[in-house]
Image: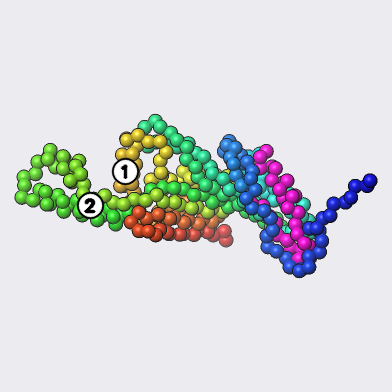
Amino acid sequence: MNALTLPDVAAQVSRQTLPLDWVGMCGIATPVLIDGQRLSATADAGVSLDDGEARGIHMSRLYLALGLLEERPLSPSLMRQILKQFLDSHEGLSVAASLSVHTDLLLKRPALISPLMGWKGYPVSIEAHLKNTMFHVELKIQIPYSSTCPCSAALSRQLIQQQFVDDFANKTLEHAEILAWLGSSKGIVATPHSQRSTATLTLRLDADVEELPLQSFIDEAEAALGTAVQTAVKRADEQAFALANGQNLMFCEDAARRLSTALARSPGITALEVRVVHAESLHAHDAVAQSRWTRDLS
C-alpha cells in the first residue's frame, strides 16, 4: 500500500486575506547557557505573516531552530542566527522575526562583612528582533533592593530629639548616661520605614555588542543604589545593612535618578528605560517612578 501524503493545512489559502504582525509560540521550555551556567528558561518565538493569503506559519520550524540554544552560550550573534533560520524557513511568508528568552540569572553574592555567601536570582529577559537586515537586542533585568523613606527618617529623628529633651531637660549631661540612653529602646523611640523594592531595567544594546553584559549592568545598578538585598548574613552583616540603608535614604524618584545617571554612562547601550517600584510598608499601594533615555545617534 502506498504511503499517503500528509495534509499541510497551514499551506492552504486563507479565507480572510489579512497580514498579521506576529504569529508564533510563547512559553517554550528550553535550557540556555549564560555565563557558564545551564539555566532553565522559556522562549517566545515568532515571525510576521506578511503573506495575507497564507493560512498560517510553520511553527515546528521555529521550534526546531531553538535547538541551538542548548548547544552554544547565549549571545546576540546566536540569537541573530536563530532569527535568520526563522526567516529562511518562512521565505515568501515573513520579513520579521523575534525571539525572547526568559530565565533567572543566578549570581553568588558575598555578605557585607562576614565571609558568608549565597545565591541570588535575578529575573532576566533577552529579546531579539530581525526585520530584513535590521537587528537589535534588548535586555530586561529585575533587581531587588531595600529603600528607606527619607521623610519617615526625618520624622523619626524629630521624635528622638523630643524624647531626648523630655528625658534630659534641666539635667547635667553625663557622657555615660547619654550613651546608655542612645543604646536603649527608650532613646530610639521611632524608626523609619523601609521596604523591599524592585528596579526593572530595559536596555537596548549597540548593534556591535558581542556579549550579554548582564552581570555588569546588575553590578552597576546595585552599586548606584547602595542597598542590594542580602543572602546569608550574620549580625555584623545585618548591622552593616542597616548602616547602608541609613546612608542611602531614597524616595522612588531618587532611586530612578540614581539608576538612570549611572547606567546612561555605560558603554554598549543605545536606549534605557528604568522603572522602580517601592512596595510601601506605610501605604497599601506602591510608589513608582520611571525614566527613559535614548542616545543621540545623529
State how the image is colored.
Answer: rainbow
**Which amino acid type corresponds to the residue marked 1 in the rendered image?**
Ala
Decide whether residue 68 is among the magenta residues.
yes
Secondary structure category for the residue under label 1: helix
The image quadrant that residue 213 belongs to is: top right
In this rendering, would 104 be left or right of 74? left
Residue 170 x %, y %: 5, 50
The image quadrant that residue 104 belongs to is: top right
Q: Is residue 237 visible?
A: yes
| Residue denoted by label 1 | 242
Q: Is residue 205 visible?
A: no
Q: Quadrant of the C terminus?
A: bottom right
Nearer to me, 295 or 92 = 92
Secondary structure category for the residue under label 2: helix
Q: What is the span of residues highlighted in magenta in the rendered image?
A: 44-71
**Which amino acid type corresponds to the residue marked 2 in the rendered image?**
Arg
Residue 102 x %, y %: 58, 48
| Residue denoted by label 2 | 157
Residue 84 x %, y %: 72, 50
Nearer to me, 234 or 7 = 7
In this rendering, would 56 be left or right of 135? right
In this rendering, would 96 be left or right of 38? right
Decide whether residue 164 is among the magenta residues.
no
Residue at the outermost top position:
115
At 31% from the left and 43% from the top, the residue drawn is: 243
Residue 144 x %, y %: 44, 47
At 19% from the left and 42% from the top, the residue drawn is: 184
Nearer to me, 44 or 135 = 44
Of the residues under marks 2 and 1, which one precedes in the sequence?
Answer: 2
- Label 2, residues with CA under 10 Å away: few <14, some 14-19, many ≥20: some
- Label 1, residues with CA under 10 Å away: few <14, some 14-19, many ≥20: some
